[in-house]
Image: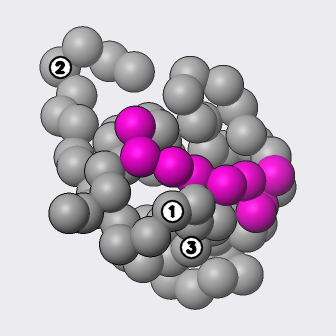
Amino acid sequence: MKKSQQIRTVDITAEPIQLYKILKFEGLASNGGEAKAAVAEGLVRVNGQTETRKRKQIVSGDIIEFANETMKIRLAQ
């Protein structure tokens, strides 16, 4: 992650949530298939590590990096 990059907070209503769904719901992929392909190709990082599991379970506090976006996941209260 670049120091100048903004971190966007993404609120989820329930955890865990599958990684590809966050990419789809946040508009970083046009559909679920595109989101799954991006993950499978190793284009997504979770907590600083390349993640290739499409259904990786994401919880509050996780950091996702993809397509020049950095998102911190937060469980909505």
Magenta: main secondary structure: loop
Residue under the point 54% across and 28% down: 47
Decide: is 54 above or below 30: above
Instruction: Please check the rendered image and state whether residue 60 is part of the magenta-colored stretch, yes or no.
Output: yes
Q: CA distance from mark 1 to mark 3?
A: 12 Å
Q: Which amino acid lies under the numbered mark 1 shown in the image of this protein?
A: Glu
Q: Are marks 3 and 2 in contact (CB under 8 Å)?
A: no
Q: Residues within 10 Å of mark 2 (few under 14, many from 20)?
A: few
Residue under the point 50% across and 83% down: 30
Quarter of the N terminus within the rendering: top left
Q: Which amino acid lies under the numbered mark 2 shown in the image of this protein?
A: Ser
Q: Position of residue 72 (x, y in %)?
A: 33, 42
Residue that mark 3 sits on: 21
Q: CA distance from mark 2 to mark 1?
A: 29 Å
| Foreground tag (1 vs 3) | 1
Q: CA distance from mark 3 to mark 2?
A: 26 Å
Q: Quadrant of residue 26?
A: bottom left
Q: Which amino acid lies under the numbered mark 3 shown in the image of this protein?
A: Lys
62 or 7: which is nearer to us?
62
Q: Position of residue 31 (x, y in %)?
A: 58, 86
Residue numbers of the magenta segment: 53-61
Residue that mark 2 sits on: 4
Q: Which mark is residue 15?
A: 1
